Amino acid sequence: MTQPINQTQNADIIVVGAGLVGLAAAVAMARQNRTVVLVDAKKPEIKKHQSWDERVYALTPGTVSWLQALGVWEEMDLTRVSDIHAMHLWGEASADPLVLGNHDANLPKLGVIVESQNLMYALWQQIDALGVIVVTDAKCKYIENTQQHIWLGLEDGTEISAKLIIAADGVNSWVRQQADIALKQRDFHQTAIVANFLAEKSHQHVARQWFAPHETLALLPLPEKYVSMVWSVSTESANELLTLSSDELAQKVGAQSRHVLGVLRPVGKILSFRLNQQTAVQLIAERVALVGDAAHQVHPMAGQGVNLGFRDVMQLESLVSATHALQDIGETTFLRKYERSRQADIATMNALTTGLDELFASDINLVKKWTHWGMRQLNQQATIKKLLIQQAVA
């Protein structure tokens, strides 16, 4: 996948980071007829999974439509993609769930569940097709700005110049650190446990979530009767759960999910990762734009992290497409438009995930009763349900 390049390479845009958001950024910018160099410190692992990938994402219809426009969706193995027709949400004291269905908003579906490797493979196919220059297994060494360019130096001596660097290099972004951009951080003191199961009963394309104090369990539909689990619990509880065997964990998940899918059989590995919320205090620096986890990391409770990152790229793509040939896309005025356009979406998502966690964690009886009452009332409010769904599937 890595392409030989000159010791000095000129481009319009450098994308640092070959995760899902970085790959999408490289594809989107290359489709704008920009010369793009994609740089990553690691060699890519591009393979089609035989077993179910433990890392899955819930993509909104808006994200899917955009991936279709990029030519990425047609490269996906759609036999491994599952539609979401409804969401069922339980509070701690809720006997019945809040039901949000596609029919409530006159939509064919609320979204889809995709495996990370399936989407990664499809993105790499477009990277190849568009002739993006790829430099992997190459660590970044320095960034240097001149009046009209930004230079990225690699440890092997390669130097790349461009008008703009798109930083898509994750939560510990090297580019963000070089640009001296500070972070606002919050530690949820939680760990997410991720695993797949084969369910006894059909999931019927329903994404299910159970909310408890500082705890969220999600069972997301995969093809056939398979489900993907994300269980966010206190780190202390997670450490205990991770000592269990796969079968013991399956029994715990079955009990926590009120056995709505019957007996659960474990499939594949059990993974875990710490949960934090962090937001860059600014999304831009001189000839640098942050996207994805380099810009923001949110709680997985709302299932919107990767969609939020893709929306960063969508906005940048939209702004770049509106420029004329001689306009400098690394110029500060241009980048400020990007930053301003993304602030509300990011702030809203941070507030939503933090607010939900605090709401369901409240030990005040009145709040608990209000939450339970509110979920019951929402089930009877067609207009409000439609608005909620429209916000969730954008």
Image (spheres, helix red, strand yellow):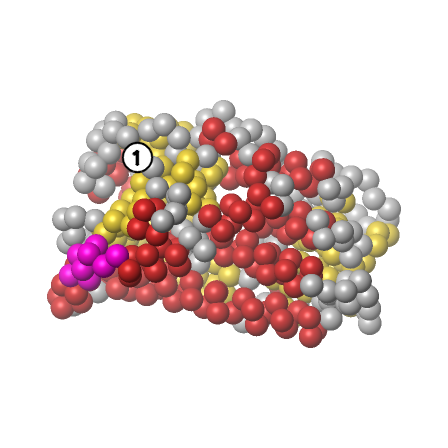
Q: Does the magenta stretch include residue 377?
A: yes
The answer to whether residue 294 is seen in the rendering is: no
Residue at image position (78%, 39%) is 3
**Residue 202 % position (x, y):** 28, 30
Report the magenta residues as a range.
373-382
Residue at image position (36%, 27%) is 224
For the residue carrying disc 1, how many other residues have a C-alpha within 10 Å: few (<14), some (14-19), or many (20+)?
some
Query: Main structural element of the magenta stretch: helix, strand or loop?
Result: helix
Query: In screen coordinates, is 132 left or right of 309?
Result: right
State which quadrant residue 159 falls in. bottom right
Quadrant assignment for the C terminus: bottom left
Query: In screen coordinates, is 137 left or right of 73?
Result: right
* Above or below 322: residue 17: above
* Above or below 15: residue 164: below
Query: In screen coordinates, is 17 left or right of 252?
Result: right
What's under tag 1, amino acid-wise? Gln
291 and 363: which is toward the camera: 291
Q: Does the magenta stretch include residue 149?
A: no
- Label 1 sits on a secondary structure element that is loop
Q: Name the residue under label 1.
A: 204
State which quadrant residue 195 falls in. top left
Residue at image position (72%, 53%) is 32
327 and 253: which is toward the camera: 327
Quadrant assignment for the N terminus: top right
The answer to whether residue 108 is seen in the rendering is: yes
Query: In screen coordinates, is 132 left or right of 298?
Result: right
**Residue 328 % position (x, y):** 77, 67
Residue at image position (84%, 54%) is 10
**Residue 352 % position (x, y):** 37, 63
